[in-house]
Amino acid sequence: MEISTHQQACQKKMGFVPEVTLGCSGQTMPVIGMGTASYPMPDLETAKSAIIEAMRAGYRHFDTAFAYRSEQPLGEAIAEALHLGIIKSRDELFITTKLWCSFAERDQILPAIKISLQNLQLDYVDMYLIHWPVRLTQHVTKTPIPKEQVVPMDMKTVWEGMEECQNLGLTRGIGVSNFSCKKLEDLLSFCKIPPAINQVEMNPLWKQKELVELCKAKGVHLAAYSPLGANGTKWGDNRIVECDVLEEIAKARGKSTAQVALRWVYEQGASIISKSFNKQRMRENLDIFDWCLTEEESNKIIQLPQHKGVTLASILGPHDLVLEIDADL
């Protein structure tokens, strides 16, 4: 995995978005992607308009998932952006979607990615991730769900299905999300195609130090979701945007707290999935590449107390297997 050093990035002009080379797949990916997970989910037209606005602002990397119910508005936004000439080709975009837990069985993976591709109106995605390392025996209509519906995932056969998706050209790369060090090492011990990405919660208050080091050592790129604490969602809070230390640094630098948090994540070598449907904030979130945190500022952030924000238990319920996954991660 190669990424521009933050010293080089300091020299880049505003609006420039560096790309990262994914060592396992050889793909290049913009280091900031627009997240589309939202609760409650906005209506299709609102979501589509926000995505088109993001493309106008310069976003070319979009992160979705079957479970987010945002594949359809993203697909419609891509079609409209092509029609309007905002983008000239689908190849300008990097699209990530995810295998939901209800499809985490060998014979359901190809049908699942085909459903996502139909929703997105695309022939292929750039990255297909296992959303969580667990299987649900039924489709989820409401949460929390009954304990008996949460079962272990057969990682070997599920990964075989993921590899088949890549071999068939339905996705250019495959990876995982919410995988702990232990689960990632288990996967690396038998996979034929290594995961290109592990997408996990990461921010100044949940640094994932051990996982960052393992991913670097194994050539797996780490992508950070909830870099701002997912403020305003069912599962997030305001601990990042209202953090005194980050606010102090932001004020001194003439930046927003969000920009300081995103810059810190970028300087750790991770890519960023950041969601905002607000026109001004989505542009501000891109404006982190022409300046650097000082050593003193970085040291202040390193000392912040750690607090995990996103838990699977908050979504599925506090079942034993779910709590085990949360404790690992």
Image (cartoon, rainbow, N blue to C red):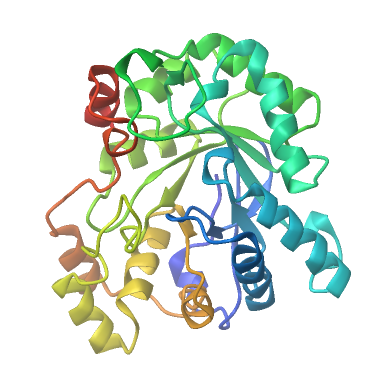
Q: Position of residue 121 (x, y in %)?
A: 80, 47
Quadrant of the rendered structure where residue 296 is?
bottom left
Quadrant of the rendered structure where residue 192 is?
top right
**Residue lying farthest to the front in this orientation:** 141
Vertical placement of residue 10 versus 80, above or below: below
Please name the residue shown 19% across and 58% down the image: 302
Q: Position of residue 64 (x, y in %)?
A: 58, 48
**Relative to 236, 198 lies left or right:** right
Quick one: 13 or 100, which is closer to the camera?
Answer: 100
* Viewport quadrant of the C terminus: top left
* Viewport quadrant of the N terminus: top right
Vertical placement of residue 312 versus 256, above or below: above
Vertical placement of residue 114 versus 293, above or below: above
Quadrant of the rendered structure where residue 317 is?
top left
Please name the residue shown 47% across and 13% down the image: 189
Please name the residue shown 20% across and 64% down the image: 301
Quick one: 18 or 63, which is closer to the camera?
Answer: 63
Quick one: 45 or 13, which is closer to the camera?
Answer: 45
Q: Position of residue 211 (x, y in %)?
A: 33, 37
**Relative to 11, 207 lies left or right:** left
**Relative to 226, 95 lies left or right:** right
**Relative to 203, 111 lies left or right:** right
Please name the residue shown 47% across and 15% down the image: 137
Q: Position of residue 269 (x, y in %)?
A: 43, 53
Q: How many marks?
A: 0
Vertical placement of residue 33 versus 81, above or below: above
